[in-house]
Image (tube, helix red, strand yellow):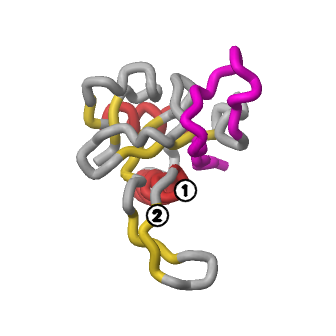
Amino acid sequence: IIVIAAAGNEKSELTPKKPKNLYYPASYPLKNIISVMNNSKHSQRSPSSNYGSNVSVSAPGVRIKSFSHNGEKEIMTGTSQSSPVVTALVAYLKAIDPSLKVDEIKMLLKLGSKKVVGFEGFNAAGGVLT
């Protein structure tokens, strides 16, 4: 089972060296977790997003059209908006090749990420999915 987890929106580095900054389930040290930070449509890192080398990848998650809890249309920002983008991509990859393992999917996400100056160290991919 692959778990796509939002990295959180506390402007914190997710690292075991700072246990109070960890955000779950994204911070569990399990191979089947793909943690996601968010970026703008211009591939800029969202200042509110959690980050770190334990974060797998970044995806668009700034000013996303969504629905609020009461069903009203709303513009939202956060890792909860970027995680579905990665979920859809992972589902697509698994549909193409059901035999793909989590580590292979993580590698494909990394290889498919656009490298962006300033993203080095902010996630394992060193860039963003566009």
In reply to whether residue 66 is colored magenta, the answer given is no
As displayed, is residue 62 above or below residue 67? Answer: above
As displayed, is residue 22 above or below residue 120? Answer: below
Dominant SS of magenta comes to loop
Check disc 2 and report its element: helix, strand or loop.
Answer: strand
- Is residue 125 visible in this depiction of the protein? yes
Q: Which residue is mark 2?
A: 76
Amino acid type at circle 2 is: Met
Q: Residue at x 57, y 44 (%)?
A: 9
Q: Tell me whether circle 1 and circle 2 mark residues in contact (CB < 8 Å).
A: yes
Q: Which residues are magenta?
A: 1-23
Q: Tell me if mark 1 has few (under 14), some (14-19) or many (20+) residues whose alpha carbon lies within 10 angstroms of its own.
A: some
Q: Residue at x 52, y 23 (%)?
A: 53
Q: Which residue is mark 1?
A: 80
Q: Residue 122, how many percent across, how many down? A: 45, 26
Q: Is residue 116 left or right of residue 60?
A: left
State the residue in front, 33 or 95: 33
In reply to whether residue 14 is colored magenta, the answer given is yes
Check disc 1 and report its element: helix, strand or loop.
Answer: helix
Q: Tell me if mark 2 has few (under 14), some (14-19) or many (20+) residues whose alpha carbon lies within 10 angstroms of its own.
A: some
